[in-house]
Image (spheres, helix red, strand yellow):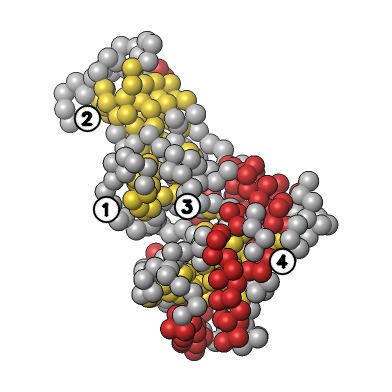
C-alpha cells in the first residue's frame, strides 16, 4: 500500500497537457473529442529559453472555450536558464499571463514548469515567492516537480510556494532506458505523498526519438515535431500503455489522500505518431490492460521473387510492436524495414525491432522483405 494517508477507490480526475506550439485543425478536433474525459486543460502558453528569450504557442482560445473546460496556463522556463531572479523575467512572465487572462477570463490557474538542477532549488523557491507577490491571490499557482528533487532538504521550501504540485514520473534520463517504469513511479509517488502537500501525478501518453553522440552526450529529443537532428545513434522510445494502465489501477486501489488526480502528457492528435490513440488513452484511464494480437501477412512486391512482410493490428487499441519476427526456414535472404533489422538465428532469419514503437488499432506496417514464398502460418511473431 501507498502510505500517504487514507486511501480512496474513487475515480481519479484527469487533466491533460496541451503541449503543442502550433495549433492545427487536428488539435482542435482532439480537444473536442477528449473534453468529456477531462477536468482541466494544462495549456502551454510560452517558453523562456536558457538565454532568457521567449517563444509563444499560438493558442486557439475559441477552441478552448468551446470545450467548456477550465484552463491552467503553463509557462515553461528552461532548467538551464542563466538566472531566475532577474526582474525582466518576472515582468515578461506576468505580462504574458495578464494578456492570456484577457483572452480567456475563465483561466483556472497558472503552472510553472522549470526542471532546474537540485542545487538551484533555493533560487527557485525565491523566484516562486516573488512571482506569488506579483499575481492575485485568487489565481492558484501549480508547479511541476522532479523525482530527482526528493532527496533535497530544499524541496519543502519550493513546494511551500505552490498551491499544487504535479509530480512528473516520466522522463528521458538515459536514451538506453525506458520512458516510464511502474515500480519506480510508485516509489516516487509514495515518497512525495509523505510530504503532505496536495499533488497530481503526471503520466505519459507519448513517445519520442532520442539521439546522442558517441560520447553519450544527448543531441535532441524529438516529440510530435521532427527536428531532423543529427547524432551518432538514435532510438525510438514509447511509454508502455499496459504498464501505465497497471499504475492507474494501483492508484485506484491505493490512492494517497493528498493525491488529487492525474495529468496526462500530452493530448494526442491524429497527426501525432509519437502518442497513443485516444481509444488507447481512454482504456488506460480506466486502468484496463491493453490487449490484442498481430496478424502477419506476406504479399508480393513489384519485384519478381520478392515478397514483403506486413504486421496488422487487428484490434481497436494500440499495441507495442513485437520484438522478434521469425521467418520460415526456407527464407535465406531478406531484410528489415521501418525499425526492424535482420539477424541470423540458429535455424532461420529473424527480424528484430530496434527500439520501442507501437502500432495503432486496425493499422498495418511493412516490416521487411524476403526472397521466398512462405505460408503465412510459418511466420513466428514473438512479443
Q: Is residue 66 visible?
A: no
Residue matched to label 1: 228
Q: Secondary structure at mark 3?
A: loop
Determine the image quadrant of residue 227: bottom left
Q: Dot 4: within a 10 Å radius of its alpha carbon, few (fewer than 14), some, or many (20 or more) residues?
A: some
Residue 301 image label: 2
Q: Nearer the viewer, mark 3 or mark 4?
A: 4
Residue matched to label 3: 206
CA–CA distance in space, label 3 to label 2:
33 Å
Q: Residue at x 48, y 48 (%)?
A: 173
CA–CA distance in space, label 3 to label 1:
19 Å
Q: Dot 1: within a 10 Å radius of its alpha carbon, few (fewer than 14), some, or many (20 or more) residues?
A: few
Q: Earlier in the sequence, mark 2 or mark 1?
A: 1
Q: Is residue 239 left or right of residue 234?
A: right
Q: Nearer the viewer, mark 3 or mark 1?
A: 1
The one nearer the camera, 209 or 16, is: 209
Residue matched to label 4: 198
Q: Nearer the viewer, mark 2 or mark 1?
A: 1
Q: Earlier in the sequence, mark 3 or mark 4?
A: 4
The one nearer the camera, 166 or 32, is: 166
User: Looking at the picture, does residue 317 appear above or below residue 306?
Assistant: below
CA–CA distance in space, label 3 to label 4:
25 Å
Residue 271 in picture, x, y percent from top left = 37, 57
User: Looking at the picture, does residue 275 appear above or below residue 108?
Assistant: above
Amino acid at each position: 500500500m501507498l502510505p500517504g494517508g487514507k486511501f480512496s477507490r474513487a475515480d481519479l480526475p484527469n487533466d491533460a497537457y496541451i503541449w503543442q506550439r502550433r495549433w492545427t485543425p487536428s488539435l482542435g478536433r482532439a480537444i473536442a473529442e477528449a473534453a468529456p474525459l477531462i477536468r482541466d486543460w494544462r495549456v502551454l502558453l510560452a517558453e523562456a529559453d536558457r538565454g532568457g528569450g521567449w517563444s509563444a504557442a499560438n493558442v486557439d482560445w475559441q477552441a478552448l472555450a468551446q470545450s467548456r473546460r477550465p484552463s491552467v496556463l503553463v509557462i515553461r522556463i528552461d532548467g538551464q536558464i542563466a538566472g531566475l531572479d532577474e526582474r525582466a523575467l518576472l515582468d515578461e512572465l506576468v505580462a504574458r499571463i495578464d494578456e492570456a487572462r484577457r483572452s480567456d477570463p475563465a483561466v483556472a490557474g497558472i503552472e510553472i514548469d522549470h526542471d532546474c538542477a537540485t542545487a538551484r532549488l533555493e533560487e527557485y523557491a525565491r523566484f516562486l515567492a516573488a512571482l506569488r507577490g506579483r499575481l492575485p491571490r485568487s489565481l492558484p499557482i501549480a508547479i511541476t516537480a522532479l523525482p530527482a528533487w526528493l532527496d533535497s532538504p530544499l524541496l519543502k521550501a519550493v513546494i511551500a510556494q505552490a498551491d499544487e504540485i504535479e509530480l512528473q514520473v516520466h522522463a528521458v534520463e538515459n536514451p538506453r532506458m525506458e520512458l516510464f517504469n511502474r515500480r519506480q513511479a510508485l516509489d516516487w509517488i509514495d515518497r512525495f505523498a509523505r510530504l503532505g502537500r496536495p499533488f497530481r501525478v503526471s503520466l505519459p501518453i507519448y513517445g519520442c526519438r532520442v539521439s546522442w553522440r558517441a560520447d553519450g552526450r544527448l543531441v535532441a529529443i524529438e516529440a510530435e515535431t521532427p527536428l531532423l537532428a543529427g547524432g551518432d545513434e538514435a532510438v525510438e522510445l514509447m511509454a508502455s500503455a499496459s504498464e501505465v494502465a497497471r499504475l492507474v489501477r494501483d492508484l485506484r486501489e491505493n490512492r494517497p489522500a493528498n493525491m488529487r488526480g492525474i495529468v496526462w502528457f500530452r493530448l494526442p492528435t491524429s497527426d501525432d505518431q509519437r502518442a497513443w490513440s485516444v481509444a488507447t488513452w481512454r482504456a488506460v484511464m480506466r486502468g484496463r490492460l491493453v490487449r490484442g494480437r498481430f496478424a502477419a501477412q506476406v504479399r508480393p512486391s513489384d519485384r519478381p521473387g520478392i515478397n514483403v512482410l506486413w504486421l496488422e493490428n487487428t484490434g481497436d487499441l494500440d499495441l507495442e510492436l513485437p520484438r522478434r519476427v521469425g521467418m520460415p526456414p526456407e527464407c535465406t535472404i531478406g531484410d528489415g524495414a521501418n525499425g526492424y533489422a535482420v539477424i541470423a538465428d540458429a535455424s532461420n532469419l529473424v527480424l528484430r525491432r530496434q527500439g520501442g514503437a507501437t502500432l495503432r488499432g486496425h493499422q498495418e506496417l511493412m516490416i521487411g522483405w524476403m526472397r521466398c514464398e512462405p505460408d503465412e502460418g510459418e511466420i513466428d511473431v514473438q512479443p
